[in-house]
Image (spheres, rainbow, N blue to C red):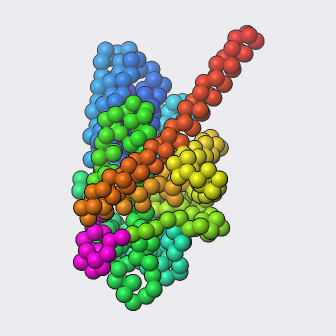
Amino acid sequence: MEDTSLLVEVINLCGKIIIENGGEIYRAEDTITRICISCGCREVETFALPTGFFVSFKTKDIPSCATVKRIKTRGTNLEKLNQANQIARSITAGEMTLQEARISLIQLSNYKGRSPYLVMTAAGLSTGFFTFLFGGNILDFLVAFVSGFLIQLIVSLLTKNDLFHIIVALLGGVISSLLAVGTSLLLPISPPIVIVSAMMPLFPGLSMTNAVRDTMRGDLSSGLAKGTEALLIAILLSVGTGITFSIFQGNNNIAIAFSSNLGQLIWSSFGGTFFFAFLQEAPRRSILPSAILGSLSCIVYYVSLLWLDSTLVSLFLGAFVIAFTSEIFSRWLKMPTTTFISTAIIPLVPGIALFLTMLSMVEQNYLEFLSRGIMAALQIGAMAMGLAVDSFVMNLFYSVKYKLTFRKENLNG
């Protein structure tokens, strides 16, 4: 009975850390299931959602045991996600007892993250580098740096409750647009570039992509929940920006695209991804590989768009390359693929398309809202398809490899 209570506490802690800090729903379910099986449990059933999870299993002594855990806060801390994954691996490999795992998971839950000043500086530098990604100049960089720094300062001051993401999205739109429009009256900057760059860390493009991925995997409840939350964040970002534009500028037309200079795309995407990884509390060993993958994704996107003249195909190929190379780094560094994908994919996420779509709705330009919304949905689908195809190919490869190894062992035996 004592061992069962300890097991329940461990799976509750591990699943909670994974979901709260940006882990995929299927990862939480798979991790909990593997821990239970390694401890001798039978008929393990796990059902997870972004807001909680349910687990039931049987043991030799207990015919039926179940636990429910509510998730009240969600964010992104890739260091916690990686550490929880490592602890789960140690349990299943027999290298750590449940009592040791419990102590480690409690310590991990209490981990506060990196210095707030370091995170705020990383947010400013990340948004600053994104201005060069969109063809901006040094003045755009400086204004975006201040904007990103202030937004992250507000994030650090707010209490993470149920309304946290909603308040941050609304204030982020207001701050970035107010600062950009106000500065443009004094300096020759491009307000659209500054605004979109400052909000890149807030864009729900990756959340939308993960929502489509979950739906494609059959996790319909998770896909719907994540998609709804991402849509709400995009709307609030647009409302915050639209209010400022309507008051101070009166011209809401925003035209923005990637820089046409490949060299500038490479180093700006590298810098933006590198500091975005700090913002996501990524493990130190994963930061440089993630930045390299961020640059690689832009190279693939740029070359594909040049040769094939198709944004959707280029996004598909860029996402596929990121996912494939993330698998390699994941096995090399013994980290979850999410650690690399979550940060490396940031230069490609169609946050701009989502932002412009929602802004058209706020402006009551419904025809433009419809056309942009369809294009944004197609771009999200293309990226999700790239990630899903890689997952299918890798699963097929390892399945075939396992069967061949098993057959070879039987022949030798």
Rendered position, 150 above or below 14 = below
Q: Position of residue 202 (x, y in %)?
A: 38, 61
Question: Which residue lies most toward the right here?
Answer: 412
Residue, x 36% and y 53% (percent of image)? Answer: 371
Q: Report x, y in % for residue 354.
A: 38, 56
For the C terminus, which image quadrant? top right
Side (left or right) of 159 relative to 106 = left
From the viewer's side, name the closer residue of 87 and 230: 230
Height in image: 135 above or below 225? below
Q: How many labels, in total?
A: 0
Q: Is residue 357 left or right of residue 263?
A: left
x 57%, y 44%: residue: 320
* Residue found at x 43% / y 68%: 255
At which x and y percent is residue 226? Answer: 34, 45
* Range shown magenta: 238-253
Reply yes or no: does residue 247 show up in magenta. Answer: yes
Q: Quadrant of residue 395?
A: top right
Q: Quarter-wise, where is residue 57 in the image?
A: top left
Q: Nearer the viewer, residue 4 or 159?
A: 159
Residue situated in front as seen by the camera: 365 or 349? 365
Quarter of the figure with the N terminus? top left
Foreground residue, 49 or 11? 49
Relative to 337, 378 lies left or right: left
> Residue 108, can we see it?
no
Q: Is residue 328 visible?
A: yes
Q: Main secondary structure of the magenta part?
A: helix
Counting from the top left corner in percent of width and height, residue 396 is at 59, 27
* Residue at (35% x, 18% y) in the render: 58
